[in-house]
Amino acid sequence: MTDAPPPEPFDDVNEQVGTEWEAQTTPYERVRTVISRTYTPVSAETVADTARTSPKTARKHLETLRDEGFVTTSTGDTGGTHYRRSSESLVVEQAADILSEVPPDELRERITELRKDVRSYQEQFGVESPDELSVARTNEVLSETGDHAAVDEEALQDWKTTRRNLAFANAALSIANAQKFVTDDSQSPPEASPS
């Protein structure tokens, strides 16, 4: 029996990946990547730490992203500026993803089906939205009236998901329609100017 050599020391894999990411990207790219996954307000220092850059550099890039509409700002508890991904940029990204996979004609059909599903949930629960259902159930409990029938949580979650999907599909269709007008306008002959 021979003695096997000891194993090599374990390097921190996360540190290695982070070092490679830093070497292969610019600070702007790293800040944009970090904030693209940030849905609750955070400080520039927090973004800088994750993006492996200085707070000053992170703040500069976050302000650029804010000017582009990719980021929104708010005032934190201590008065500093906090940043998060803007909901508008998320909607546009989701809509673009949908359009890359679903042609507008098929999207119209899907929207029709999603609307039918939403109407079905409205009939099933007797209210217009999941939020109204929550309010109605809370009011029943507080007033101690009604039968306090349990709500099918899975159906409620499906309803919320269907409404969200419908909203994104409508946004995608709106973008497709707007793109059509832009394309049509750029291909039409220029109007004659009065002499």
Image (cartoon, rainbow, N blue to C red):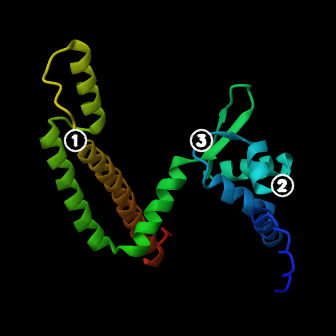
Q: Are marks 3 and 2 in contact (CB under 8 Å)?
A: no
Disc 1 versus disc 3: nearer the observer? 1
* CA distance for labels 3 and 2: 20 Å
Residue at 42% x, 62% y is 175
Residue at 74% x, 60% y is 30
Helix, strand or loop at label 3? It is loop
Image location (x, y in percent) of residue 49? 79, 49
Q: Quadrant of the N terminus?
A: bottom right
Asked whether the viewer can see residue 93, the reply is yes
* CA distance for labels 1 and 3: 29 Å
Image location (x, y in percent) of residue 35? 66, 52
Image location (x, y in percent) of residue 32? 69, 58
Judge left or right: residue 45 versus residue 146.
right
Q: Earlier in the sequence, mark 1 or mark 3?
A: 3
Q: Is residue 46 above or below residue 34?
A: above
Q: Are marks 1 and 3 in contact (CB under 8 Å)?
A: no
* CA distance for labels 2 and 1: 47 Å
Helix, strand or loop at label 1? It is loop
- Which residue type does callout 1 highlight? Asp
Residue to which mark 3 is pinned: 40
Image location (x, y in percent) of residue 20? 80, 71
Q: Earlier in the sequence, mark 3 or mark 2?
A: 3
- Which residue type does callout 3 highlight? Thr
Residue to which mark 1 is pinned: 152
Tell me the quarter of the picture where residue 89 sits.
bottom right
